[in-house]
């Protein structure tokens, strides 16, 4: 369905202009689904938190940890594995067991070399659950690693992952609301809602998690209400590439945001994601050309000190055409004349995974506005190159891949 003003209130000149278009005009412009799916996130997060607090769902999530797994693997393809990257360090710190995000393709081709031995929990994250490698990986691990249990987090009740394992006792399912099964090619609300669901594995108090989710939803709405126009202006700047910076688990959010810009620009904008400290070790050379720098600041003060140092260095060296800095209480000394500071009160108090959801929302809006500026269609960028679900490809017999 197209976005209309009555669906989502967003007092932004840019968004108002898009809303004002008729149904057919929205579809012809190719943004009806993507804009709705980006802007529905605050409400869908509240609904997902309510789902997670339901006794049956909370019990099922507790059950996957009751066997005391020795390690956790978060897997998926494309955006889905970036959700795993946002979750892995957070789960490891909370549960005190090794946690890794591993692309499904790596597990498919190099299972023995990537899956640790022992009693593992495999968390498969997938919007549609129909990518060829998704079920192939679960099948392979069920066959070769019987000590592992599985949790599938998906948005599609009719997908292969949601239907194939209904009678398999080692597999549990967390099915999100159908609205999160984005119709657009790019993943937006599906990504953040699956990230929110995965974060519930660290929570003993579903009510507190729901309250924190409400604060995250409010923060995302502030991005839409107060910063969308400025993000649209930044997206029209003449940058050739975009570099996304984060620290720790935030690198998953940086990678997802970089992917959104790459996808929605149809490859016209070269993108890279890097840590603040890693940028100095070669990747900073990418900023020699007209570049957008997007910086997702850490909630930890000791980490932010390193991040501020890097931002000041970029300013001193006059690297980057413009910068978007996302955080709370951002000091004026790290914001240049042409930069955009998205300063969000309460951001540092959010659960870490929820903070990364806000970072990704900023990345989504930037990519969306850039796509429109380039005359492309956000609902289906890179027509003829990408498809919403990866096309079928042959699954070959496993060898002795290490």
Image (cartoon, rainbow, N blue to C red):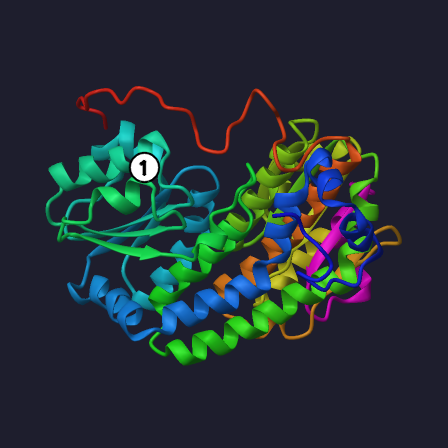
Give the residue furthest to the right: 337
- As for residue 326 lying within the magenta part, the answer is yes
Query: Image quadrant of residue 321?
Result: top right
Identify the residue at image location x=27%, y=60%.
97
- Residue 78 lies left or right of residue 362; in this view the side is left
Residue 49 location, x and y as percent?
A: 44, 69
Nearer-the-camera pick, 46 or 234: 46
Crowding at mark 1 (Cα within 10 Å: few <14, some 14-19, many 20+):
many
As drawn, 303 above or below 178:
below
Query: Image quadrant of residue 173?
Result: bottom left
**From this viewpoint, is residue 168 visible?**
yes
Residue 13 location, x and y as percent?
A: 84, 56
Identify the magenta region.
Answer: 312-334
Identify the residue at image location x=55%, y=43%.
255
Element carrying mark 1: helix
- Residue 225 lies left or right of residue 382; in this view the side is right
- As for residue 144 lying within the magenta part, the answer is no
- Residue 398 lies left or right of residue 274; in this view the side is left
Nearer-the-camera pick, 251 or 221: 221
Tell me the quarter of the image containing the C terminus.
Answer: top left
Residue 298 location, x and y as percent?
A: 59, 62
Identify the residue at image location x=27%, y=70%.
56
Please tell me how many numbered marks the rendered image carries. Answer: 1
Identify the residue at image location x=36%, y=61%.
91
Query: Image quadrant of residue 53?
Result: bottom left
As drawn, 397 above or below 54:
above
Residue 356 location, x and y as percent?
A: 55, 58
Q: Which residue is disc 1 drawn over? A: 134
**From this viewpoint, is residue 248 visible?**
no
Nearer-the-camera pick, 301 or 353: 353
């Amino acid at each position: 369905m197209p976005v209309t003003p009555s669906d989502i209130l967003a007092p932004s000149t840019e968004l108002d202009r898009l809303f004002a278009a008729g149904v057919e005009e929205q579809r012809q412009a190719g943004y009806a689904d993507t804009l709705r799916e980006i802007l529905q996130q605050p409400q869908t997060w509240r609904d997902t938190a309510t789902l997670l607090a339901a006794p049956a769902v909370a019990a099922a999530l507790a059950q996957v940890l009751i066997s005391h797994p020795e390690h956790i693997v978060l897997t998926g393809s494309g955006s889905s594995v970036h959700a795993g990257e946002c979750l892995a360090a957070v789960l490891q710190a909370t549960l005190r067991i090794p946690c890794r995000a591993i692309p499904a393709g790596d597990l498919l081709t190099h299972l023995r070399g990537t899956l640790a031995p022992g009693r593992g929990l495999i968390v498969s994250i997938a919007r549609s659950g129909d990518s060829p490698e998704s079920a192939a990986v679960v099948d392979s691990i069920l066959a070769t690693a019987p000590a592992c249990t599985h949790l599938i987090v998906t948005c599609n009740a009719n997908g292969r992952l949601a239907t194939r394992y209904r009678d398999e006792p080692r597999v549990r399912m967390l099915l999100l609301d159908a609205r999160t099964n984005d119709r657009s090619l790019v993943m937006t609300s599906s990504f953040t809602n699956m990230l929110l669901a995965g974060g519930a594995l660290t929570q003993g108090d579903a009510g507190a998690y729901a309250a924190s989710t409400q604060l995250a939803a409010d923060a995302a709405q502030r991005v839409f209400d107060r910063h969308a126009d400025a993000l649209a202006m930044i997206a029209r700047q003449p940058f050739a590439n975009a570099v996304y910076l984060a620290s720790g688990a935030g690198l998953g959010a940086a990678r997802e945001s970089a992917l959104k810009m790459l996808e929605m620009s149809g490859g016209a904008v070269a993108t890279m994601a890097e840590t603040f400290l890693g940028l100095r070790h070669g990747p900073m050379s990418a900023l020699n050309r007209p570049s957008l720098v997007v910086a997702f600041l850490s909630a930890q003060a000791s980490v932010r000190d390193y991040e501020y140092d890097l931002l000041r260095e970029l300013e001193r060296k006059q690297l980057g055409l413009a910068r978007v800095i996302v955080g709370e209480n951002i000091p004026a000394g790290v914001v240049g004349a042409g930069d955009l500071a998205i300063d969000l009160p309460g951001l540092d108090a959010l659960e870490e995974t929820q903070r990364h959801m806000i970072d990704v929302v900023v990345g989504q809006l930037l990519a969306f506005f850039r796509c429109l500026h380039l005359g492309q269609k956000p609902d289906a960028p890179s027509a003829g190159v990408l498809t919403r679900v990866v096309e079928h490809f042959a699954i070959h017999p496993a060898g002795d891949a290490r």
